[in-house]
Amino acid sequence: MSKIPLEDLVKKLELEIIFDGGVREIELATSDINRPGLHFAGFFDYFSKERIQVIGKSEMSYLSKLDRDKKLEHLDEFFSADLPCVIVTRGMEIPKYIVDCAVKYNCPLLRSHKATTILMNKLVNYLDSELAPRITRHGVLLDVYGVGILLMGESGIGKSETALELIKRGHRLVADDAVEIKKVAEHRLIGDSPELIRHFMEVRGIGIIDVKALYGVGAVINAKAIDMVMYMEFWDNNKEYDRLGLVENYIEILGVKLPKVELPVRPGRNLAIIVEVAARNWRLKQMGYHAAKELDRRLNDFIQQNSDS
């Protein structure tokens, strides 16, 4: 299971530390957030204590209206649950009784000046991204006409050279050689590059080049959703390649099925323009138009008309 340090979250969302409580030692394992209104009322059934606890204006107002003994009793039970952290929103003044409970149970107490709903949205988005299942694949990821295309194939097949031609045509590089892929939703994969090699590319015979420095900031992008995979392989005269495209092939990455196109490579083939055509064709399919099926329909109609006459 993926985990991220609480300290990284504090830095990313610019949270103010009211009481440290071991921020550097705590790790977060879930993107779920809890607002403890019911728990401040004394209802602790189904208490998700492993979640980040967010106290907003409603919870703070409710606490202020409770009598002292009941308030301290509920807060004592709340903070004793070994919470990862408690965040108070809207930059509200934090009463001493909350600070005392946090200190008593060594629970990190943080504060944000953002509104509660805005903070929770940022928390979920950040945690979903950082805790997402991930894998690294060898290949080149490009943004071609807004379509995320992952070029795969054995080393030396020409992936980087094809990518360079596409960059020259105005498309954008996401990652070369090592593509870090994370599953951010049930059917959505995001690819990016390791920070160390971001925007760099290896071209055999030349060496390492910096795509951003050579072609400008418009030639690169940090991350992109992966829409399809194009697998490059050396042309095999004994293999029958699909010439119509009626059969859809797929590849599964992190449990997500992606359309897969096999791209045979041999001298004389303009691979860059084939990748562009594949991207445009994918977009047409997303809009409901499938050229191969349309041709098949026309042929069937033609055969049917001739057989009836």
Image: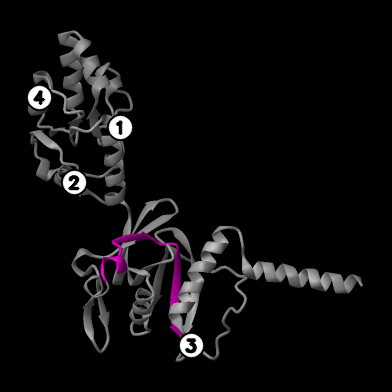
* Quadrant placement of the C terminus: bottom right
> What residue is shown with label 3?
235
The percent coordinates of residue 130 (x first, y second) are 27, 51
The percent coordinates of residue 76 (x first, y second) are 16, 21
Where is 274 relative to 239, above or below? above
- Element on which disc 3 rests: loop
- Mark 2: few, some, or many residues within 10 Å (few <14, many ≥20)? few
Disc 3 + disc 1, Cβ < 8 Å: no
Q: What span is in magenta?
A: 216-234
- The amino acid beneath tag 1 is Thr
> What residue is shown with label 1?
117
Disc 4 + disc 1, Cβ < 8 Å: no
CA separation in Å, label 3 and label 1:
55 Å
CA separation in Å, label 2 and label 4:
23 Å
- Element on which disc 4 rests: helix
Answer with mark 3 or mark 1, whichever residue precedes in sequence.
Answer: 1
> What residue is shown with label 4?
99
Tag in front: 4 or 1: 1
CA separation in Å, label 1 and label 2:
17 Å
Which dot marks residue 12?
2
Answer with mark 4 or mark 1, whichever residue precedes in sequence.
Answer: 4
Answer with mark 1 or mark 2, whichever residue precedes in sequence.
Answer: 2
Disc 2 + disc 3, Cβ < 8 Å: no
The percent coordinates of residue 4 (x first, y second) are 21, 49
Residue sitting at x 62%, y 76%? 244
The percent coordinates of residue 119 (x first, y second) are 26, 36
